[in-house]
Structure formats: C-alpha cells, structure tokens
Image: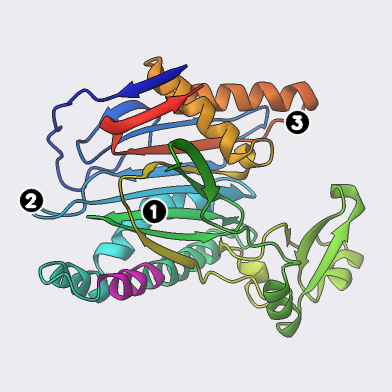
C-alpha cells in the first residue's frame, strides 16, 4: 500500500531561541516538522535528555539544532549538557564567523565544523568543572547532535547514541546510520586508551562487552573503591576516566540535504540496541501517515519488543526530524 503526503501546510511563526526539552507530539515549523518522545523503561530513573531549538537564525537563514544525551550515573551530566550546550555554541567567536559567512555562502562546512568542535570542547570543560564542584566525578553522558543550516546538515556525536537518515533510493525508502558508536575496542579508540594508561576489558558479567577502565582500576577495587568503567570511549564528563583516554572530541559529519532525504532520527542506545534503522523508520512513517505521534509509537513498540525478550528495558529517547514532509511516499 502506498501512502503519500502532498498537502501544503502553513509555516509556523518561530520565535528565536525557543528551547524544547519536553515531549512533542508533532510540530510543523515549515522548514521541517519534528516529533520527540522519551520513556523511562523499567529503570529507576530517567537519565536521558533531549533538546530541540527550532530557530537559531534570522529571517534570511533557517538554522535549527537537535540533540539527544544519554547520561550515566544519574542525569547530572545529560541535564547539564542539555542546559548549557547552546550557549557554548552561540557565544563562541566561531559561531559569529559562521553567521557572517552565511551572507557570502563561502566556507560554510569548515566554519560549521569548527563551531561544533569548539562547542563540544568548551561545554565539556564547564561540565567537568561542575562535576568537581558537585562531587560528580563519575557522571558522564553520550551526545548526538544535529545542526541544520539552510541545506547543510552537521552531525556530531560522542558514545553510542546515534542518528540515522531515511532517504529515497530508486523509488523506495532506505535508511542508514550516520554515526559509528565509540566503543573502547574500536582500533582507534583502543590505541588512544592504552596510550593514556587505560585498559579495555571484556566483561563476562556484561555479555562480554568491552569496557574502558582506568589504569588504577585493579588497585582501587582491591582497597574497596568503586572505580568508574564505561561501555563507550567518548563522552561529556566522566572526570574519573578523562586522563585514561575518555575523549570529548566529537566525530563530525557534514552533508547537503536534497529531495531524497526524508527524515533524521536521533535516539539513545535504548532504541538502537533492539531495533534496526529500517524497522524504526517503518514504524515512524506508519504512525506519521496515520496522524499519530511518530516517536511515541516508535518507543512504545521498542519497549514492547524489549520486554518480550527481557524484563530489563532501558531508557529510550527519540527525536524525529521530518524533512521535505510535503513529498514523502511510503510503501507498506
């Protein structure tokens, strides 16, 4: 069965610098539409956070920001980054250089990459300072962010939160991930960790998954401490492991959107651990064309799938950004 959406929709008036941090059923901003939802699963606390900033630009430029942050050892790091990350973007000299360049259209990708890299660097520095102040040396968070500037899409990430894209290929919808998880056993990651005095250990108690540990892990454990260990090798925060190779340098990917790109899906690993990108987009588009909340339906189905396998259902957060929403065709 084929569904298509070709109706014209009115462009919403977007006030500058609105920051959305609560679930959003479905909102049309003209340049894009967005749905966001989050669920605690069966965990004791919700450590995920997300952020949507519909308008960072002006009347001449469409600039929007989206982020998903998955905290570890509570929500301190994920919530802090949610609150401070936009300030670290918009108050930097690199951001002003980027805005100036938009008037000429020159060197946009390089300037955008510089602005995003500096945002991650300075946000991590502030977070680490706050972690020391609040005795949160173990608190960390993954991050996946998307900055849309006119037709440029700038993706950056740390850890195992991901973004995927749905796109048209030969008349059908296909999908792919745009990020690669930062796992401690990845060759590049492992090399940095070992060179920094850390170690990569595969733990039988965690399905033989690789963990980043500090070089002092065994000694501290023997004296009764609970030293930090992480399943990812790049993150905001994680003060206890920073000197052992835990990096806050993001991988950055930039491409130009076109009419084949239909939707971006940012989500924490609670979704991607149990669902492929193809399966996720199929659910999203079914809900979209049935006028339901796409991300709410997606997370409900993901949790049902997880609970059918195990009682342990992780926090899940998803932000779906529908591009070219007036020209989407879906074959069921």
The part of the image, by quadrant, that contains residue 142 is bottom right
Q: Relative to residue 120, is residue 19 depicted above or below?
A: above
**Label 1 secondary element:** strand
Q: Which residues are magenta?
A: 108-117
Query: Which secondary structure type mostly characterizes the magenta part of the structure?
Result: helix
The residue that label 1 is drawn on is 146
Q: Position of residue 295 (x, y in %)?
A: 46, 28
Which residue is the extreme one toward the front?
A: 170
Label 3 crowd bin: few (<14), some (14–19), many (20+), radius 10 Å: few
Marks 3/1: CA distance? 29 Å
Image mark for residue 320: none
Q: Relative to residue 249, is residue 262 depicted above or below?
A: above
The residue that label 3 is drawn on is 312
Please tell me which residue is depicted at 35% across the width and 75% down the height of the picture: 114
The residue that label 2 is drawn on is 59
Q: Nearer the viewer, residue 22 or 207?
A: 207
The part of the image, by quadrant, that contains residue 226 is bottom right
Which residue is the extreme one toward the left?
A: 59
Q: Nearer the viewer, residue 210 or 324?
A: 324
Label 1 crowd bin: few (<14), some (14–19), many (20+), radius 10 Å: many
**Label 2 secondary element:** loop
Please tell me which residue is depicted at 69% across the width and 24% down the height of the picture: 305
Please tell me which residue is depicted at 32% across the width and 75% down the height of the picture: 110
Q: Position of residue 182 (x, y in %)?
A: 64, 62
Count up the numbered dots: 3
Marks 2/3: CA distance? 47 Å
Marks 1/2: CA distance? 21 Å
Q: Is residue 293 visible?
A: no
Q: Earlier in the sequence, mark 3 or mark 1?
A: 1
Q: Position of residue 200 (x, y in %)?
A: 80, 69
Q: Earlier in the sequence, mark 2 or mark 3?
A: 2
The part of the image, by quadrant, that contains residue 310 is top right
């Amino acid at each position: 069965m084929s569904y298509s959406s070709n109706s014209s929709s009115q462009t919403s008036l977007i006030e500058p610098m609105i920051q959305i941090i609560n679930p959003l059923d479905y909102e049309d901003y003209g340049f894009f539409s967005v749905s966001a939802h989050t669920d605690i699963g069966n965990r004791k606390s919700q450590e995920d956070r997300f952020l949507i900033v519909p308008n960072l630009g002006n009347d001449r430029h469409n600039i929007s920001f989206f982020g998903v942050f998955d905290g570890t050892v509570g929500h301190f790091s994920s919530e802090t980054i949610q609150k401070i990350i936009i300030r670290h973007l918009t108050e930097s000299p690199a951001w002003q250089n980027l805005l100036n360049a938009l008037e000429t259209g020159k060197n946009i990708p390089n300037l955008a990459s510089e602005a995003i890299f500096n945002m991650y660097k300075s946000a991590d520095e502030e977070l680490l300072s706050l972690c020391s102040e609040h005795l949160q040396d173990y608190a960390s968070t993954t991050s996946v962010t998307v900055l849309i500037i006119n037709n440029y899409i700038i993706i950056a990430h740390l850890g195992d939160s991901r973004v995927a894209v749905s796109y048209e290929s030969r008349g059908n919808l296909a999908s792919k991930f745009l990020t690669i998880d930062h796992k401690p056993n990845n060759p590049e990651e492992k090399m940095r960790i070992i060179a920094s005095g850390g170690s990569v250990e595969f733990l039988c108690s965690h399905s033989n998954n690789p963990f980043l540990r500090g070089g002092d892990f065994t000694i501290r454990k023997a004296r009764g401490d609970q030293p930090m260990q992480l399943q990812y090798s790049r993150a905001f925060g994680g003060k206890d492991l920073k000197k052992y190779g835990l990096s806050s340098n993001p991988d950055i990917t930039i491409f130009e959107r076109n009419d084949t790109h239909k939707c971006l899906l940012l989500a924490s690993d609670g979704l991607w651990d149990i669902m492929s990108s193809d399966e996720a987009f199929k659910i999203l588009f079914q809900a979209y064309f049935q006028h339901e909340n796409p991300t709410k339906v997606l997370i409900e189905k993901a949790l049902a799938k997880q609970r059918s396998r195990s009682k342990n259902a992780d926090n899940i957060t998803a932000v779906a950004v529908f591009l070219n929403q007036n020209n989407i065709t879906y074959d069921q």
